[in-house]
Image (tube, grey):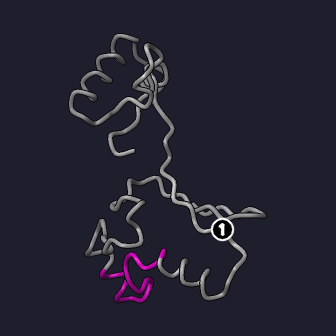
Amino acid sequence: MVEIFDHRIEMTNTGKPLVDPQRFLDTPPQSRNEALAAFLRRIKVCEERGSGIDKIMQAIETHHYPLPEPQFDINKSYMTRASLRQRLHCSDNAAKQVIGQTCEKSLLRLANPEAKRNFQYLPYWA
């Protein structure tokens, strides 16, 4: 999704990045679906995979736009047992079991490990 505001442009992709955002500038490009990416390059819908951030940075530097450097943020909205209960329409005990099993498989992590109650959870990759 692309949103244009008076003082910024925000581009949102709800998928998990293939590359750690801290390594965007120095990691070789990767594609989730190389066959699709190759086809789109052949029909000239896109030119190369993974070159967008480099082009943005080069344009900012070349044209001396009065813009701050881009910020790459991962959405870190957390889940709670209450929000899972509401989403799944299940009992508190069922939500507790789902969270426990998911944490055991290291697919969730505590967002607030210092808390004694009202735990908040994030996906393991966030």
In the rendered structure, does residue 82 fall within the stretch colored magenta? Answer: no
Residue in view at x 55 percent, y 78 percent? 56
In the rendered structure, does residue 42 fall within the stretch colored magenta? Answer: yes
Residue in view at x 33 percent, y 15 percent? 94
Q: Which residue is mark 1?
A: 68
Q: Residue furthest left?
A: 105
Mark 1 element type: loop
Quarter containing the C terminus = top left
Number of marks drawn: 1
Give percent across and percent down for residue 50: 39, 75
Q: Residue furthest right?
A: 6
In the rendered image of this protein, does residue 26 appear above or below residue 112?
Answer: below
Give percent across and percent down for residue 12: 54, 58
Disc 1 residue type (three-letter): Pro
Instruction: Decide if residue 5 is on the left or right side of residue 96.
Output: right
Residue in view at x 51 percent, y 54 percent? 73
User: In front here: 6 or 86?
Assistant: 6
Q: Residue 70 falls in which quadrant of the image?
A: bottom right
Give percent across and percent down for residue 69: 60, 68
User: In front here: 44 or 115?
Assistant: 115
The magenta-colored residue range is 38-53
Q: Residue 42 falls in which quadrant of the image?
A: bottom left
Give percent across and percent down for residue 5: 74, 62
Circle 1 crowding by C-alpha within 10 Å: few under 14, some 14–19, many from 20: few
